[in-house]
């Protein structure tokens, strides 16, 4: 079912959201997304799953002209997306997200989602496990979780009537510092442009199920 919201429509039609999603390169620069609606999109995307519900993802929403001008030279292969979209969302993972473990588990108990004894057991077992993980192991877990929310973010954006494009072509070693973030703590995952397409994205060929699937 689709509903009209202002100039654009939202939808909860699964096929429209998933099967008609396209990667869009050029956007209508006149279309703006309010920070209130962007916050709704991010909150809905944040329902994505993560290992032990640790939610390592962090977002930098670049929606001002000044922010886009700062981003453009760091995303030289994606200038059109950066400059014409309503916003570019830089997805990072927080290498120190273990700091939020007690808050996450404590709020789960407070809200009735988890018994206190389960929280105590989790903290006793999981906190030292996470603390002992190597940097590469932690990176693998956090990249998987941050990739899950990135895909969910694009689908949520589609449900809100917007188009997106995930981008890996940017200066990953410079972006955090360029926007005043701790580059050791906040590790880049991808950029996602969001807005209303000025030109529809192209359909793409997908390998058949028999090619990509093994049954056992």
Image (cartoon, grey):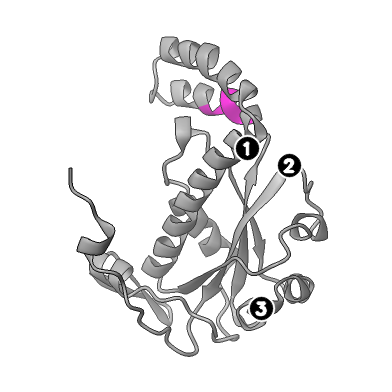
2 or 1: tag closer to the N-terminus: 1
Q: Nearer the viewer, mark 1 or mark 3?
A: 1
Q: Secondary structure at mark 3?
A: helix
Q: Is residue 13 visible?
A: no
C-alpha distance separating marks 3 and 2: 26 Å
Residue under label 1, please give it. Answer: 136
Residue 152 x/y as whole percent: 42, 56
Find the residue positioned furthest to the left. 216
Q: Is residue 163 above or below residue 55?
A: below
Query: Could you tell whether 83 is left or right of 155 in the image?
Result: right
Crowding at mark 2 (Cα within 10 Å: few <14, some 14-19, many 20+):
some
* Dominant secondary structure of the residues highlighted in magenta in the image: helix
Residues shaded magenta: 100-104
Give the x, y percent position of residue 194.
53, 72
Q: Which mark is residue 77?
A: 3
Q: Residues within 10 Å of mark 3 (few under 14, many from 20)?
A: some
Residue under pointer 2: 185
| Residue occupying the point 32% across, 68% down | 17
Identify the disc placed on residue 149: none
Q: Is residue 196 above or below residue 60?
A: below
Mark 1 / mark 3, whichever is N-terminal: 3
Residue 154 belongs to magenta span:
no
């Amino acid at each position: 079912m689709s509903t009209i919201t202002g100039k654009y429509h939202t939808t909860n039609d699964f096929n429209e959201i998933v099967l008609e999603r396209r990667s869009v390169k050029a956007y209508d620069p006149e279309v703006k997304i309010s920070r209130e609606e962007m916050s709704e999109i991010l909150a809905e995307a944040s329902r994505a799953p993560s290992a032990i519900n640790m939610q390592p993802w962090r977002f930098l929403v670049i929606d001002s002209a000044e922010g886009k001008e700062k981003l453009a030279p760091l995303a030289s292969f994606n200038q059109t997306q950066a400059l014409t979209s309503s916003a570019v969302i830089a997805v990072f993972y927080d290498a120190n997200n273990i700091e939020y473990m007690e808050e996450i588990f404590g709020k789960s108990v407070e809200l009735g989602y988890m018994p206190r004894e389960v929280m105590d057991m989790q903290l006793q077992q999981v906190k030292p496990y996470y603390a002992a993980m190597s940097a590469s192991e932690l990176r693998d877990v956090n990249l998987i979780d941050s990739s899950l929310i990135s895909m969910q973010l694009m689908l949520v954006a589609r449900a809100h009537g917007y188009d997106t494009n995930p981008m890996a072509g940017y200066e990953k070693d410079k972006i955090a510092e360029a926007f005043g973030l701790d580059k050791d703590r906040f590790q880049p995952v991808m950029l996602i442009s969001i807005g209303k397409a000025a030109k529809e994205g192209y359909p793409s060929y997908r390998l058949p199920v028999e090619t990509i699937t093994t049954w056992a």
